[in-house]
Amino acid sequence: MRNSPRNAGASGRGFGRGFTGNGYSCWNGPVRSHALFVDENKCIGCRECVHHAGETFAMDDVLGSAHVEVQFGDQEQKIQVAVESCPVNCIHWVMSEELAVLEFLARPQQKEAHGVFGGGWERPRDVFAAANNFTKRLQREEQQDMARQQRYNNGDACEEGETERQAEARRRAGQELRWKRLRDVWNGLRDWTKPGVDGP
Ligand code: SF4
């Protein structure tokens, strides 16, 4: 039943590597304004939620924590009982648009290894704060991409790592080169039309 990007491979590199913009849980019925999210860092794996709303929650036996498999997989009453039964209050109602980032960050991420040091897996201690920072950075990077695209569309794109001043100098040099070519063509034509000069 689950479309399972939870185990999907990473796409892209660097910041947000593997983030597709889609959440891992799927929806029973239409997408609603709010959704369920399990803070897996806090989950103690007691299975209470699965017991009360087994079409909504599922256990990950490898990680030893529960997650939402299907949003609203059970009747709301059962879901509410499951939420209230959680002994550590780690099942949260969140806004649907926050879900994809929260679910992405709740999944253990591979740590960057430096030679034989580092490596392994990690997930943020405070997934909500991490999601906040992640979303802000994502928005910033999207805005920068859009600005770069806009400059590119205007024909005055900056090269990677180029300052505005360098870009301006490069634009002027390009313009100067175009004018020089035009002048050369014009001078060639003018000489050619002079009496006694053979054509090109
Ligand atoms: S009830 Fe809470 S602590 Fe227990 S498995 Fe579900 S989410 Fe985890």
Image (tube, helix red, strand yellow):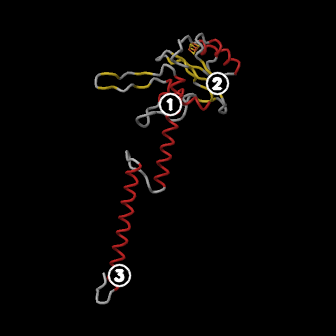
Determine the residue located farthest toward the bottom in the rendered image.
Answer: 195
Q: Give amino acid for label 1.
A: Phe
Gap in Å between the C-alphas at discs 1 and 2?
Answer: 28 Å
Q: Earlier in the sequence, mark 1 or mark 2?
A: 2
Pointer 3 residue: 190
* Residue 32 vertical placement versus 144 (above, below): above
Gap in Å between the C-alphas at discs 3 and 1?
Answer: 63 Å
Gap in Å between the C-alphas at discs 2 and 3?
Answer: 81 Å
* Of 134 and 91, the residue lying toward us: 134
Q: Earlier in the sequence, mark 2 or mark 3?
A: 2
Dividing the image into four equal quarters, which quarter contains ligand 1? top right
Give the numbered dot on residue 73.
Answer: 2
Determine the residue located farthest toward the right in the rendered image.
Answer: 77
Looking at the rendered image, the quarter that the C terminus falls into is bottom left
Q: Quadrant of residue 198?
A: bottom left
Q: Residue at x 39, y 47 (%)?
A: 163
Pointer 1 residue: 134
Q: Residue 82 appears at what percent x and percent y? A: 64, 15
User: Element at badge 3?
Assistant: helix
Q: Residue 138 appears at what percent x and percent y? A: 50, 36
Drawn side of residue 3 relative to residue 174, left or right: right
* Residue 37 vertical placement versus 146 (above, below): above
* Of 17 and 78, the residue lying toward us: 17
Q: Give amino acid for label 2.
A: Gly
Q: Give amino acid for label 3.
A: Arg
Q: Earlier in the sequence, mark 3 or mark 1?
A: 1
Q: Residue at x 35, y 68 (%)?
A: 180
* Residue 183 vertical placement versus 67 (above, below): below
Looking at the rendered image, the quarter that the N terminus falls into is top right
